[in-house]
Image: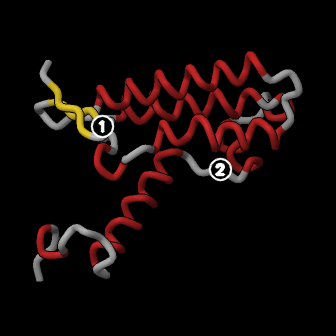
Amino acid sequence: MHEERDLGVIISVDLKASLQCVKAYSTANRILGDINRSIVYKSRNILLNLYKLLVRPHLEYCTVAWSPHYVKDKEQLERVQRRFTRMIPELKQLAYADRLGSLKLWTLEERRVRADLIEVYKIVHGLSAIPFSSFFRI
């Protein structure tokens, strides 16, 4: 399969982002494993800050350009966040939605939609280098 890489984003010839999802998943999952092995005192605040600083950026880097559209890719990325929420001892028995609510986190899909909406806002209001006319017709 032939793909192009630009600014760290991998896009295949058929414009699928599956390879980027695999790369983001494996990097984020590896870092999460490193955190899990190296942190002895697993306090909610420490783990949450480490996740936000070290793991989530790999799952969200440039998602406006490569946002996954296959369910399998979305689930693969969400698996990292599910694993993270189970690392917190007092939340381990809760359902995923309850763990997210307790940590005041959104699903990664919700965060990607938010990023898309912010980018559209910037384009519409002339706050982006992307010209309005290249996306929208009046």
The x, y position of residue 33, in whole percent, is 64, 19
Residue beneath the point at 74% across and 47% down: 103
Point out the image quarter for the C terminus. bottom left
The quarter holding residue 48 reads: top right
Do labels 2 and 1 touch, CB within 8 Å?
A: no
Residue type, numbered disc 1: Val
Q: Secondary structure at mark 1?
A: strand
**On the image, numbered disc 2 is attached to which residue?**
105
Instruction: Name the image colouring.
Output: secondary structure
**On the image, numbered disc 1 is attached to which residue?**
9
Residue type, numbered disc 2: Leu
The x, y position of residue 72, in whole percent, is 37, 28
Q: Secondary structure at mark 2?
A: loop
Which of the marked residues, 2 or 1, is nearer the chain's N terminus?
1
Query: Mark 2 or mark 1: which is in front?
Result: 1
Could you tell whether 17 is left or right of 60 in the image?
left
Could you tell whether 32 is left or right of 77 in the image?
right
Q: Is residue 117 above or below residue 81?
A: below
Point out the image quarter for the N terminus. top left
Question: In this view of the protein, which residue sits in the foreground, 130 or 22?
Answer: 130
The x, y position of residue 38, in whole percent, is 76, 19
Distance (Cα) linking label 2 and label 1: 25 Å
